Image: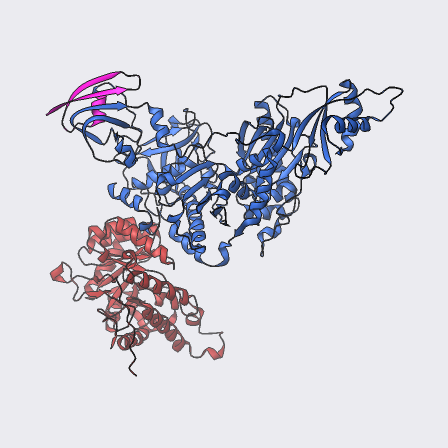
Chain colours: A red, B blue
Amino acid sequence: MPIEIPKDKWPGKIQSVTIGAAAAEGGTRTKSITIGGQTCMPYLHYEAPMPNRPVIAIEIKSRKPDDWSSLLAEVWGDAMNDPAQWAKKAEEAGADLLVLALTLADSPEDAVKAVKAVLGASGLPLVVWGPGQAEKDNELLVPVAEAAKGEKLVLGICEDKNYRTIVATAMANGHLVQARTPMDVNLSKQLNILISDMGMPHDRIIMDPTTGALGYGIEYGYSVMERLRLAALQGDTMTQQPMMVTPGFEAWKTKESKVGEGVPESWGDWKARAINWETLTAIALVESGADIVVLRHPESVKRVSEAIGELISV
Amino acid sequence: MEHTVIFTTEDNKTATVTVPTNTMLADAAHIAGIDIGQPCGGQGRCGRCAVQVTDGNVRRRSTLRLSPADVEQGYALACQTVVEGDVSIYVPPQEKIERRLTTDRVVAEVTVPADYDYDLAQSIRRVHLQLTPPTMEDQIDDWSRLQTAFRLQANMQNVNCSLHLLQTMGETLRAGEWQVTAVIERDIDNPDKPIRLIELYPGYVDEYSPLWGCAIDIGTTTVSLWLVDLISGQVKAQVAEYNGQIARGEDVISRIIFAGKNGGGQEMRQRVLDTINDLLETACKRVKAKPEDVMKATVAGNSTMIHLLLGIPAGSIRLSPFITAVNHPPLMTAKDVGINIHHEGTVDCLPGVASYVGADITAGVLSSGLERAENVTLFIDIGTNGETVLGNRDWLVTCACSAGPAFEGAGVMNGMRATQGAIEEVWISNDTLEPTYRVIGGGKPKGICGSGLISLLSEAFLTGVIDKAGNVNLTAGSSRVREGTHGGEYVVAWGAETESGEDIVMSRVDIDNLLRAKAAIYAGFTVLADTVGIPLETTDKVLVGGSFGKYINVEKAVQIGLLPDMDWPRFEFLGNTSVKGAYYALLDWRKRERITEIAKRMTYVELSADNSFYEAFTSALFLPHTDLSKFPSVEAALHKA
């Protein structure tokens, strides 16, 4: 007996967003990336094609971080001392785009210099994060946005208490913004509204609903992303932004990834465990609808990339 | 082209001017020397400049604040309407406009219930007795002599009295030369039950002189007391003050915790008694009476307030499974409770439903008329505990949520109660971001009361002073907007204009408190309506209670998402429904019985049972709401701004 698989037809569509501008569009990127555009829940190819594959960003920093796992220091080596070198290595490792995180130690000049160096070293689209303190973020991101005018960077991280300056400078200089909210459907929607209210076009907002690592609240993050996607497909325009999440950051702060000694033997090999932790966290989020996952370890990038390849092949 | 405009004012004075096509009516009036008030600065937002076009052609650019019926009658906003031909305009007096705009929002003056009959309804009575003086032949004791008089002259067969009265009785009888006035309390439903003698006065007290009782509402934030003449039924004095317990916790939970500490319960009890007794004294002074002349106090309040008043441990209210010690306390004497009315006077604490739905709500359901409503009606008490009742004469469901005291002006930097000196309404100019405000009593402002805060929040939102999340826009380009000690703030009144000489501001913290309060209340009634499957828009009426001033402005309460977006005529503002319910119960024993019935009929919905309340709360934590489609009128107003 033939079985007919029921198909959902949704009134809503995820916003298509393009990151990075090539010379013809006023930037210097060798390629740009488009995400979003879905018209069904993730990977239901029999309902509708996936117009764009999820992409992987690798997170690098303007200065060598002293709080990252020694496993990461080992794999990136000296490149961590030089953002341009690090960017090149990240591109070689298979990144679709780069995230450059600025630090509290950076002056506005340092920040601009680091961004320029990365843009010079790699042709990949770029996301730039401030160090995560409202005043400092604004102080660094404004000159960066001006110096990289037209590159279609993604500037982050906008939060509901601090979004105006970042959005204003992104609008003035042709960039995009990353809008982060604590894991909650309503809060994500509210920040999208606030940013739209300033006049930012929808195709330049990427939402970051925040996530937790495997074993540290990923279920909640997963569920929020799934509900955001359902709301978007049901036609709620203020939840139709593509989603960007940071499984690398989350996974590498868990004890399982960070600590190699004094843990039960049954936990197994430290390095294998740490990479598994990042990979599994990322793949779960990709399956819940993430459009960009930000990772830290090259091996995880390879594995997540393979998993995405399988998911999108019909 | 030139047109003739004839203005007529209330006193039948006319003024005629000639103006070109498209002249604004307000400008034409100005040329004609007629003053039309424009508190919102001519933005067409306050509706105070409405005039009536009695003849001729005008074009209304906006009719915001006017109903279709108003326009039908020729009303037009002078600041939004231009001349397109010869016209005649009637300029109504300013107060009349205010009254017209606020018709449905003015709290009704306290009128004595039409069916009040002292003889039939009142359990407290004053009785004149003429005793036969004792002689050598008639050596019957004083108390038996008094009881005989009660039997023969008042048909009261069974009268009890206290030891204290016995101690003073002999002296009173002789001082009055065997003529006395007794104040007694009877149980109207059970005539066989003993009648309690409260007080004995020597001689005859004038039968029309007031017989005092008081109705008290113990709110978490505000305590209100009405002093009532039980003979006429009239409310002779209304007083209110912040609950002295606020110093030991702003919400019921923190008060319960404090009361659970060593000596805490006693302190809490004393604090609220001090507040009540101060209010009693103030009210009595106003009518030249003494607190001990008050023979009965009927008390409404949430369950925690009643427990703390009576010194009953309230800890079990806070902890699962959330049980009160008593929902319906028995009648008590004032000397036991500690309220300074007549020491033998009765204190009647009205019955509540559950830990978080107390006597304030059962009393509110009575006084709001909800229990007799034919159609489904929503009753919202905008207070610290945000209780909501939905239903009609056949069924009642209720819930409570912690909203906080912001709408009563507490927990807000420049907040105050709705009394003299409170800013009760604010308008902000779209162009300059300069405010215009109205102060209760008209003098220098001292602070902002609940209705002023609602109005201020709404205006700040519509003019872009704050964004939908309540962030103050520091780049708005006005000196009124500045970085304060607690984040961004908006200056409503500069120090030079205020009573204290300090600036009156709305801070980021205030905005957060207001947002949380309005979100909790909105979430409460939406979840309640969802629970019983009644779409909010199908409710016939929305009755709003709370310790506001004269009224709150529906439009602004809707704009901030505190009240649902419905036609304004469906809202009714009732003021403090709890004290009013206590007043009805004080007057009429049958109404008192009805409150007991209401308490039994109400079904309590526990909002913490699942996460639907939290969802509704976070989506309401936005201006007006995350889902703007729920607020079409606000969407339209935003579009205009």
Any magenta on residue B469? no
User: Which residue appears farthest toward the left when viewing the image?
Assistant: B1
**Visible residue check, residue B129:** yes
Q: Is residue A135 above or below residue A75?
A: above
Range shown magenta = B1-30
The spot of residue B324 in percent (x, y) is: 61, 50
Q: Is residue B522 left or right of residue A307?
A: right
Residue at (19%, 63%) from the top-left corner?
A120
Q: Position of residue B254 (x, y in %)?
A: 56, 47
Foreground: B103 or B338? B103
> Where residue B622 appears, x then y in whole percent?
36, 48
- Residue B23: say if magenta: yes
| Left or right: residue B347 compared with residue A151 | right
**Which image quadrant is residue B289 in?**
top right
Residue at figure coordinates x 51%, y 44% from the top left? B371
Depth check, front residue: A53 or A85: A53
Q: Quadrant of the N terminus of chain A?
A: bottom left
User: Tag count in the figure?
Assistant: 0
Relative to A59, B212 lies left or right = right
